[in-house]
Amino acid sequence: MVIVLLGPPGAGKGTQCKRIVEKYKLVHLSSGDILRSQRASGTELGKKAAEFMDSGRLVPDHLIIEMMVIAIESAAGNCVLDGFPRTVVQAAELDNELSRKKKKIDAIINLVIDDSILEKRITGRRSCPACGAVYHVDTLKPKVDGLCDKCSQKLVQRTDDKPKVVKQRLETYHQQTAAVVGFYGDKGRQIFDIDAAKSIDEVTALVFKKLDSLAAVR
Ligand code: ADP
Ligand code: AMP
């Protein structure tokens, strides 16, 4: 099963993906997380991606496509894609890659939310550098201030979650990524719009309802 989660930065894709993979036993493939781990390991890809990520721009398509094809392969095609595709070129290549593997996207979920809410969500996000768990300074606090509940590591703010870069990332979303929804729409694919301004649990309930209804007819 392949699920694609679309939505602007801060919409809650990562948060919901963690819950989806647990319930439906899928692999969570976050292009942002993979890039951050490449950077942490000091790989060539990580070095090439750094400048784009830190300025809130997209990493070039050919690098991302190569990276995600490998990731999808390692997940044996049973995955939730988070942060990919982010351009129409990436979306077309994903279709090609899946059809080569005789697979297809089973569900496209689009988290819909206004920019005015996103800025607070992103600048308040705190992440665990060790296990990738995500918190928020107001809405999802860890049990002990500043420490990860799961591994007790000190939580950090991603450098690209600072206000100046956030502005650029939202601009990048509207200029390059929002068109991915149109790409799937033009192809007649069903897109499940979910109101991502609701609470984390309410969004999860809506997502699960959609995925359960799909699973029932499979
Ligand atoms: P994305 O992966 O789309 O960039 P995240 O899942 O990392 O977004 O969420 C961004 C921030 O917003 C995190 O700090 C997260 O805890 C918080 N968050 C996610 N979903 C909600 C929600 N429905 N309501 C309030 N805060 C949320
Ligand atoms: P994210 O963790 O999804 O917010 O992504 C963090 C950053 O990684 C983005 O701002 C981009 O610079 C880069 N990135 C992640 N996914 C992609 C993608 N599919 N295409 C291009 N750049 C990406």
Image: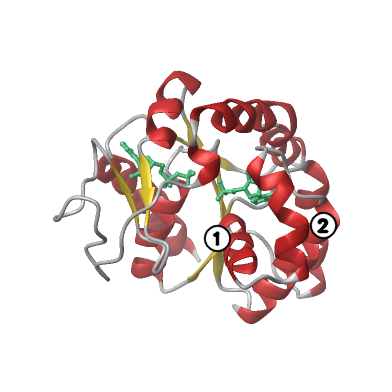
Residue 155: give x, y in percent of width and height. 33, 55
Label 1, ligand 2: CB separation under 8 Å = yes
31 above or below 101? above
Residue 133: give x, y in percent of width and height. 36, 60
Q: Which residue is mark 2?
A: 93
Q: What residue sits 44% from the left and 28% below the top?
A: 118
Name the secondary structure under disc 2.
helix
Looking at the rendering, which quadrant does residue 18 occupy?
A: bottom left
70 above or below 11? below
55 above or below 205? above
Most foreground residue, 215 or 7: 7
Residue 33 tag number: 1
Residue 99: give x, y in percent of width and height. 79, 67
Most foreground residue, 191 or 120: 120
Most foreground residue, 41 or 4: 41
Q: What residue sits 65% from the left and 37% below the top?
A: 56
Image marks 1 and 2: residues in contact by CB distance under 8 Å:
no
